[in-house]
Image: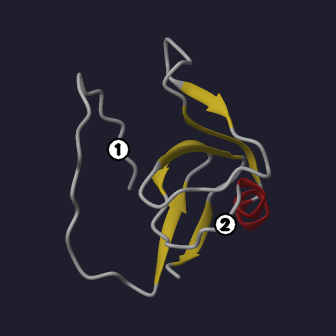
Amino acid sequence: MGLWVNVTEDSNLTVAGIVPLSTTIYLQTGWNLVGFPSFQQDYTVGNLKVAVTAERIEGFEASAQPYFLRLMLDEDSLQTGFGYWVRVEADVDWIVEVS
């Protein structure tokens, strides 16, 4: 699950629970807001595009008003706990290994 929260000052959102070995994210045709539920530091936008045949992936950019989004490049790494907008042409399952 991805969350897009507009805060007025620096904040932390702490999530607690049991970490699964993998997570299946069900992407539907069109735009999907997803979180990156993995501790893999070398997982890139290019890896995601190959895994789900994504057309476009956008991520948070504080200076990109009014929507605070930027087009992610294939070499950009996905960050644990960050949210991303992913556009796919057809329904697909994205299976993410946690580590």
- Residue 93 % position (x, y): 59, 68
Task: Give the left or right position of residue 95, taking residue 52 as reference.
Answer: left
User: Residue type at mark 2?
Assistant: Tyr
Vertical order, 23 against 53 (above or below): below
Q: Residue at x 56, y 18 (%)?
A: 64
> How crowded is the residue under tag 2: few (<14 C-alpha within 10 Å), some, or many (20+)?
some
Count of numbered circles in the view: 2
Q: Of callouts 2 and 1, which one flags the residue occurring earlier in the amino acid sequence?
A: 1
Residue picked out by circle 2: 43
User: Residue type at mark 1?
Assistant: Leu
Task: Give the left or right position of residue 71, taking residue 62 as reference.
Answer: right
- Residue 41 % position (x, y): 60, 68
> How crowded is the residue under tag 1: few (<14 C-alpha within 10 Å), some, or many (20+)?
few
Q: Residue at x 50, y 23 (%)?
A: 68
Residue sitting at the far front:
10
Q: Nearer the viewer, residue 36 or 93?
A: 36
Q: Residue at x 21, y 57 (%)?
A: 14
Residue picked out by circle 1: 3
What colour scheme governs how the chains and residues are painted in the rendered image of this protein? secondary structure
To which quarter of the image does residue 81 belong?
A: bottom left
- Residue 22 % position (x, y): 48, 82
| Distance in Å between CA atoms under marks 2 and 1 | 20 Å
